[in-house]
Amino acid sequence: MSWIAVDWGTSRLRVWIHDDAQVIALSSDDGMGTLAPAEFERALLSLIEPHLRRDVVTPVICCGMVGARQGWSEAPYRSVPAAPPDATGAKRVTGTDPRMDVRILSGMSQLQPADVMRGEETQIAGFIATQPEWDGVLCLPGTHSKWVHISAGEIVSFRTFMTGEMFALLAKQSVLRHSVDAQDLDAEAFKTAVGDTMSRPESMAGALFSLRAETLLDGLDPATARARLSGMLIGMELAAARPYWLGQNIALIGDGTLASLYAAALQAQGVPTQTVDADAMTLRGLYSAYTAMKGT
């Protein structure tokens, strides 16, 4: 084994153990949100200890919420404009197990408007490593989606939107939970809701309640209601993020249904996109940090 890559989010811990022959992927539910600072080392060892050697110190490169103020050890932010952080400026963690050399990659910050990221900067580093000449805007859909302006290998500026979290709250905890209880989405209803909300974002609060009213009065199909809710929220985000995507090269870092929805919403505005796999970019970014660490 040569090194270990770790992506430690709020709800999940994911680990990739690298050696010359293979990559072993492991995961657990020991996310940052479930752990006290003193519990992180134990949580990591529960996954990787069978792969550690007594006579070797193994590099462990971590990204994500493990470096938050409530994480294992707070890693500093790097202010934009700047290249994504690598291991040369990472936070070194002093643990109790001498078989590990643990380093946590820094996040990135922006003062005006105030914004931060942890974890996404590693995906961005992976993207830049694979497409070093690329200039444009990266969109990273998620619970807190991000729009990131990239130029000359640096993050110039970025903006975070709580779209995914708002969708979860409205779909699970608001009165709309009775109307959007479906797994499927009506694609045409989604596109229509995106366009309508971009045209009149100020009307969204009223349009949201109409979903409930139409369910009661006209038996609105849950798949249609869910699609319209998603379309309204993504449409509101696109309206606010217009300075980022208008006239720019756009790449999505994501996978699954959510990335497809963002791609469809942008294509409906005449904006072509490319999509790259989020896990692949995370691993590529962690690998770039590891190669930088080998000389430190």
Image (cartoon, grey):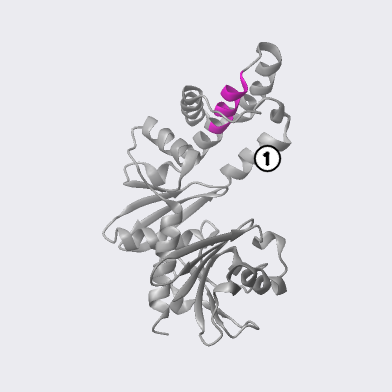
Answer left or right for 157 relative to 161.
Answer: left
Q: In the figure, 189 relative to 4: above or below? A: above
- The residue furthest left is 133
- The residue furthest bottom is 55
Q: In the figure, 130 relative to 202: above or below? A: below
The kind of secondary structure the magenta stretch mainly shows is: helix
Q: Is residue 32 rendered magenta in the image?
A: no
- For image coordinates 70% across by 36% down, the residue present is 172
- For image coordinates 57% across by 22% down, the residue present is 224
Other residues around mark 1 within 10 Å, as few (<14) / some (14–19) / many (≥20): few
- Residue highlighted by disc 1: 169
Extent of the magenta region: 221-230
Q: Amino acid at mark 1?
A: Leu
Give 185 or 142, whichever is nearer the viewer: 185
- For image coordinates 36% across by 64% down, the residue present is 154
Could you tell me residue 156's position as x and y percent?
39, 60
Dot 1 falls on a residue whose secondary structure is: helix
Quarter occupied by residue 168: top right
Give 58 or 34, whichever is nearer the viewer: 58
Answer left or right for 32 relative to 265.
Answer: right
Q: Is residue 135 visible?
A: yes
Could you tell me residue 82's position as x and y percent?
40, 67
Could you tell me residue 296's position as x and y percent?
42, 85
Could you tell me residue 30's position as x and y percent?
66, 61
Quarter occupied by residue 291: bottom left
- The residue furthest top is 218
- For image coordinates 52% across by 31% down, the residue present is 231
Q: In the figure, 54 relative to 175: above or below? A: below
Give 16 or 82, whichever is nearer the viewer: 16
Q: Is residue 155 visible?
A: no
- What is the count of numbered marks? 1
